[in-house]
Amino acid sequence: MVNTDNHDLKEKQKLVEKYRIFISYSRKDEDFVKTLVDVLEDLGHYLEFDTNIEPRTPFSAAIRSMIARSHIFMPIISPATDKSQWVHQETGYAIALQIPVLPIGLGIEPQGMIQSLHIINVDEGKRNSDDLADYLKNCLCGGLLRRIARPTPAIPKHQFEVTSWQEERTERLARYTSQVLHLGGSEPIRQMEALSSFSLPAENLTEEQWRSRESSNFSSHYYRNLKRLERLAFEDYVLRYGCKLIITPSISLERRGEEVTTERLKTLLDFLYQSKKQKSQVEVIEAERIPAVNKTIVGSWFLATARVSKKEGYPQTIFNWHGPTVLRAIEDFDRQFEEIRKVNIKGPKSGNVDDMIDYLKNLIEKQAKKRTGKIANEYKET
């Protein structure tokens, strides 16, 4: 017979990443700490505490250094802790450095700076039982340590932010989208833009491939990497919550140039194929004209608006986290989307992914034939 408890524990252990953990404790809790150390080392973690200090090394400097390089600070909170100034000092130092803290309570609730934190409680009965090690292992397996070591990034405290450079805009879109993905929700990404963020590449491209997408306005390697991060962040979000896009592919051909736009259309087409395969909730529709203001709404969390300049790209983007304003922007976007769709049952204005796929394929094929014709004419002339 299979021991399901042991099987579940092994499965949990597979999920454990390896962290440096500093344990802060009173000497009176040394027996418990020895068991805890054995469990954590068995799980593959590297432990930092006072026994690791080399001879002749200044004690307080060594402690500070170990705390500073730890992934997790783990204070043992017990009745003896109140009489230990070291545990309190070390805890304050870890919090000041923003090292994630996971207290272990031995029959006592944490107070002061750490009273609001998640705690693993070990009562006296558990502490004196034969299955203490198994109990600790179960508590520390799975995703707990990962959640502690990788806390969800905080969203901006301010409601408005203005970026003045394209690179700033792209970096914020990628970072903020990744952050709100952790916060959850149910609303899709909504975007009104010439070809959308999904015409950006998700994979690493060669210099030649980038140049075919950028015409004569070549981007720096830094900006290219940011574009890719934006696309990847959006893709992760769409996989869970979907997207609604209002785009202008045919007009973009005229404005950006045929070859450049065709490369971007191919990337967008690949995204639509992929989203259909993954059964993501994607709706995409063609507008009559390029919007004066590009809009990106991520969930119901934030709105980014920008006027596009032919020479400068996005000279200024306004990020808005004001809840009521974001909700009004969602209503406005959805109204525009439905106004386009209600008079178009089929074709690129229907909102249907299959219709847009067919439309983009035809556009790309027409451009390929056009280029072939141009090449043939140039050959004849020579």
Image (cartoon, helix red, strand yellow):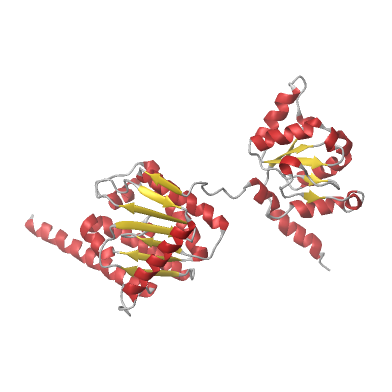
In this picture, is 253 found above or below 75?
below
Residue 201 in view: no
Percent of width and height locating residue 39: 80, 47
Relative depth, front residue between 69 and 316: 316
Q: Quadrant of residue 275?
A: bottom left
Percent of width and height locating residue 317: 36, 49
Q: In the current view of this chain or complex, which residue is farthest to the top? A: 56
Q: Is residue 62 left or right of residue 81?
A: left
Figure quadrant of the N terminus: bottom right
Percent of width and height locating residue 246: 34, 65
Q: In the current view of this chain or complex, which residue is farthest to the left? A: 381
**Residue at point 83%, 53% (across, down):** 134
The count of marks equals 0
Residue 152 in view: yes
Relative depth, front residue between 228 and 75: 75
Relative depth, front residue between 218 and 82: 82
Q: Is residue 289 left or right of residue 325?
A: left
Q: Quadrant of residue 374?
A: bottom left
In this picture, is 200 found above or below 360?
above
**Residue at point 56%, 48% (across, down):** 154
Q: Is residue 187 left or right of residue 70?
A: left
Q: In the current view of this chain or complex, which residue is farthest to the front? A: 324
Percent of width and height locating residue 180: 52, 55
**Residue at point 74%, 41% (across, down):** 112
**Residue at point 88%, 52% (across, down):** 126
Figure quadrant of the C terminus: bottom left
